[in-house]
Image (cartoon, rainbow, N blue to C red):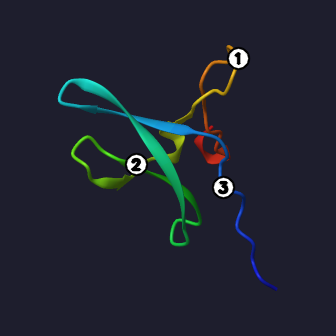
Amino acid sequence: MKNRKPRRPSGRWIYYILEGGILWPCPVRWEWESGYGGWLPFYFSPTLEFVAGDPTKAWRVPGSGNRPARRLHWPEAA
């Protein structure tokens, strides 16, 4: 039987990094990593490198309305 991978996190996501004393918001692109066994957030850093980030540090951008931004909930991060 074929193992199915979980769904990719939906919506827009941002990864914040501190570079040169400035907090940079970097848009996230989720990619499946079979060695990790899950979806990892990849982003372009201010130095234009395509970097894999920590999934627990990715923030979802709220849609319409006044909802606050939220983090991805990983069971092992709790």
Mark 3 surroundings within 10 Å by alpha-carbon count, few (fewer than 14), some (14 through 19), many (20 or more): few
Q: Amino acid at mark 1?
A: Gly
The N terminus, quarter of image = bottom right
**Marking on residue 14:** none
Name which residue type carries label 2.
Answer: Tyr
Q: Nearer the viewer, residue 61 or 55?
A: 61
Mark carried by residue 8 = 3
- Name the residue beneath numbered marker 1: 65
Q: Which quadrant holds the C terminus?
A: top right
Q: Residue at x 69, y 22 (%)?
A: 64
Q: Nearer the viewer, residue 14 or 40?
A: 14
Q: Nearest to the eye among marks 3 and 1: give it.
A: 1
Please name the residue that numbered disc 2 is placed on: 43
Q: Is residue 66 above or below residue 20?
A: above
| Position of residue 23 measured from the top left corner of the image (x, y, whole percent) | 31, 26
Mark 2–mark 3 CB contact (< 8 Å) = no
Helix, strand or loop at mark 2: strand
Within 10 Å of disc 2 (Cα), the crowding (few <14, some 14-19, many 20+) is many
Q: Is residue 76 left or right of residue 59?
A: right
* Local SS, label 3: loop
Give the spatial CA distance, label 2 vs label 3: 15 Å
